[in-house]
Image (cartoon, grey):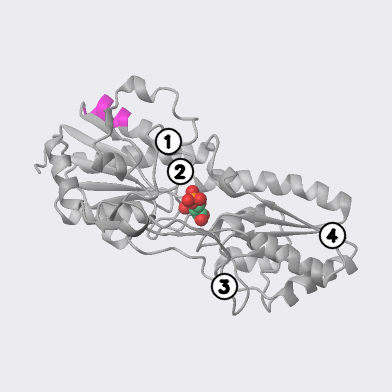
Amino acid sequence: MSNKIDAIGLLTGGGDAPGLNAVIRAVVRTAVGHFEWDVVGFYDGYAGLIEKRSRKLEMDDVSGLLTRGGTILGTSNKANPFAWHLGEGESRQTVDRSQETVSAIRSMGLDALVCIGGDGTLSIAHGLHEMGVPVVGIPKTIDNDLCENDRTFGFDTAVATATEALDRIHTTAESHHRVMVVEVMGRNAGWLALESGIAGGGDIILIPEIPYSLDAICEKIMWRNRSGRHFSIVVVAEGAMPEGGEKVVARVVEDSPDPVRLGGIGNAVAHAIEERLDLETRVTVLGHLLRGGTPTAFDRILASRFGSEAVHLLARGQSGRMVRLAGADITSVGIDRVANRQRLVPPDHPLIRMARETGVCFGDGEC
Ligand code: F6P
């Protein structure tokens, strides 16, 4: 494929996140409006690419998108050209359709592909780049767990939504003298639980990176009661687990690259607290609520900067890269450094240290 760009493809893959439409808008405005390229949007992530379901995106198509949640292109966290699932049950098989995918990109006259997504989407993008497709990745996930990047878009909105929920939970917890357990998303990384837990005044924050002990949790709750605070807020990431225990699996999605879906740890923790302490406990699972809605101003700006920089990278003849936020700057990094890696919360992270010093218990020996 040549260095000169006339047309690019665009897709959104993996779970949706607030700000996806703002990225699409920025890519189209920069590519079509500024560079006068054509932009073809594929429906439902890599599924649209393989099944040749797409539409040309014009300036009018992205009008009003800055504030809109979800993705106008649709997304999928199942479609993978390198491991495409065919058939059901006994006759089910997995085939490699990557060569066909590369041919489709060429036959459509596309000079490059912009892939917006998380770890799975960007790992596939890396694979396509290795096969000669000029690709630029844009990091997205409300979990904020992509390596080589300080902030994914969508995370700030999810933190704001969870914080508002915690503020509301606080007042009812206090009125009823209850323990309120709030489960948030965060499969392997606890960034969302950590930041919303701090912002929402959580007393106990449980994250996947720090296995918890029920003794420590109950001791903290009883200490609060003895100090005259007859309610407690426990924020728990869906991937949190007890010392020596396992994550709670809600379902297995067979044809997904990462088939395990978590959920249920909030109920498990609440049940265990009620069994041990004579305190009424309630659970709220925020789940997919955290992925929806209007992006915050921060996410709209980050999404716009990412989308614009992705197009500029291609215009400068650079590909095989992911745009990223490094401090206050938008730069880029080789997509190979991001694929199949995860950015977890270091247990000695300054936020954890500060939270501990201001009285937050992480369910371990240091409460
Ligand atoms: O990638 C973000 C994420 O929100 C995870 O925290 C969560 O485990 C997963 O997506 C849920 O995905 P699904 O849409 O398949 O339920």
- Describe the element under mark 1 as helix, strand or loop: loop
Cβ–Cβ under 8 Å for marks 1 and 4? no
Residue named by callout 2: 16
Callout 3: 10 Å neighbours few (<14), some, many (20+)?
few
- Describe the element under mark 4 as helix, strand or loop: loop
- Describe the element under mark 3 as helix, strand or loop: loop
As displayed, is residue 301 above or below residue 80? above
Callout 4: 10 Å neighbours few (<14), some, many (20+)?
some
Residue 142 in view of the camera? no
Which of 235/45 is in front?
Answer: 45
* Residue occupying image coordinates x 55% and y 43%: 157
Dot placed on the residue nearer the N-terminal end, 3 or 4: 3
Expressed as whole percent of the image width and height from the top left, the position of residue 231 reads: 83, 58
Residue named by callout 1: 71
Residue type at mark 2?
Answer: Asp
Per the model, the C-alpha gap separating discs 3 and 2 is: 27 Å
Residue type at mark 4?
Answer: Glu
Expressed as whole percent of the image width and height from the top left, the position of residue 129 reads: 20, 53
Q: Nearer the viewer, mark 1 or mark 3?
A: 3
Q: Which residues are magenta?
A: 28-35
Instruction: Give the number of marks.
Output: 4
Residue named by callout 4: 280
Q: Is residue 53 magenta?
A: no
Cβ–Cβ under 8 Å for marks 1 and 2? yes
Q: Which mark is residue 189?
A: none
Residue type at mark 3?
Answer: Glu
Q: Is residue 34 magenta?
A: yes
Q: Quadrant of residue 105?
A: top left
